[in-house]
Image (cartoon, rainbow, N blue to C red):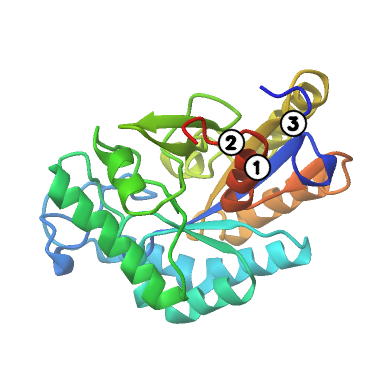
């Protein structure tokens, strides 16, 4: 790494707030799926039919969670990256407009919130392209980045490059970006993180908001020291409208932001801003 590397404002630690928008794009037999989505706060997995209760749990994110999260980000003057399933934004145009009007970034999170690991190359290309075109139609411009529903294929990055994406988030290998070459082209890999994600409060009911807040603060404190003493870092904080947007969890997020807001050498950046800062200082190795 360049020893003189720094994030904007001469900062050494970048914090990336990632807000996942999946509600309305999850698995549902009304959209042609064989079963309802298995990601359920009560861990109810149905093999057929509709899970009406879970559908309304997802819609809570759009109706109540989103306004809370948007307000909190505004209160702290933070620009976030909204990793959005394109269909979710199509079905929630007021939310899409609010994200754009508040100058947040929209990153593609699939056309629907669905797995793509089973897709052949052309099926995956159609899926990625459809998300891009939908977001352009709903939000006014193409997304620059991509985050899958966790699993990807050997063709994903090749397709992303060909479709004009500049960064890819499906990576958990580091706390700093890198270039990855694919068939004589390169794309920025912008690592994400699962351990600081609010999803842990859904999959493990014993993981409380206080646990999550402490984990975020402990992660920040460690990375803050490393970034100043060893090398610059990124800290990812993953949020979901239907999870962090619940009243009993919002205060945990606020406590974390209160802890970090006045620290010297900390910069809140969108994933696109992070990619642009990285590329400016560590240029594409193939150009």
User: In front: mark 1 or mark 3?
Assistant: 1
Seen as rendered, the residue at the extreme front is: 287
Question: N-terminal of the two: label 1 or label 3?
Answer: 3
Q: Is residue 3 above or below residue 105?
A: above
* Quadrant in the rendering for residue 90: bottom left
Relative image position of residue 139 (x, y in whole percent): 46, 74
**1 and 2 marks in contact (CB < 8 Å):** yes
104 or 76, nearer to the observer: 104
7 or 25, nearer to the observer: 7
Which type of secondary structure does the marked residue at label 2 adopt?
A: loop
* Quadrant in the rendering for residue 54: bottom left
Relative image position of residue 22 (x, y in whole percent): 39, 59
Residue at 16% from the left image edge and 69% from the top image edge? 30
Relative image position of residue 108 (x, y in whole percent): 40, 56
Cα distance between the residues tagged 1 and 3 = 10 Å
Residue at 68% from the left image edge and 69% from the top image edge? 71
Cα distance between the residues tagged 2 and 3 = 12 Å
Q: In this view, does 222 lie above or below 113?
A: above
Which label is found at residue 283?
A: 2
Seen as rendered, the residue at the extreme bottom is: 94
Which label is found at residue 5?
A: 3
Which type of secondary structure does the marked residue at label 1 adopt?
A: helix
The residue that disc 1 covers is: 280
* Left or right of residue 42: residue 213: right
Instruction: Give neighbour class at mark 3: few <14, some 14-19, many 20+ (Cα, 10 Å).
Output: some
């Amino acid at each position: 790494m360049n020893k003189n590397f720094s994030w904007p404002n001469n900062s050494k630690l970048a914090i990336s707030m990632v807000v996942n928008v999946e509600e309305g794009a999850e698995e549902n037999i009304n959209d042609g799926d064989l079963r309802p989505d298995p990601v359920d706060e009560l861990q109810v997995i149905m093999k057929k039919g509709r899970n009406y209760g879970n559908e309304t749990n997802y819609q809570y994110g759009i109706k109540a969670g989103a306004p809370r999260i948007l307000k909190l980000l505004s209160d702290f003057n933070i620009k976030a990256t909204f990793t959005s399933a394109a269909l979710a934004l199509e079905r929630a145009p007021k939310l899409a407009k609010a994200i754009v009007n508040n100058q947040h970034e929209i990153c593609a999170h699939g056309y629907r919130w669905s797995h793509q690991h089973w897709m052949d190359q052309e099926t995956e290309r159609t899926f990625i392209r459809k998300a891009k075109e939908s977001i352009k139609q709903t939000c006014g411009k193409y997304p620059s980045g991509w985050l899958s529903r966790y699993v990807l294929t050997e063709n994903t990055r090749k397709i992303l490059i060909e479709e004009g994406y500049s960064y890819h988030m499906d990576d958990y290998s580091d706390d700093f970006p890198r270039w990855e070459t694919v068939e004589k082209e390169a794309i920025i890999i912008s690592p994400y993180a699962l351990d600081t994600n609010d999803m842990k409060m859904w999959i493990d009911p014993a993981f409380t908001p206080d646990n999550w807040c402490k984990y975020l603060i402990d992660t920040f404190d460690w990375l803050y020291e490393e970034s100043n003493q060893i090398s610059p870092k990124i800290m990812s904080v993953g949020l979901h409208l239907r999870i962090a947007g619940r009243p009993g969890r919002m205060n945990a997020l606020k406590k974390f932001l209160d802890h970090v807001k006045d620290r010297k050498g900390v910069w809140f950046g969108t994933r696109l801003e992070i990619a642009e800062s990285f590329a400016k200082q560590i240029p594409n190795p193939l150009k």
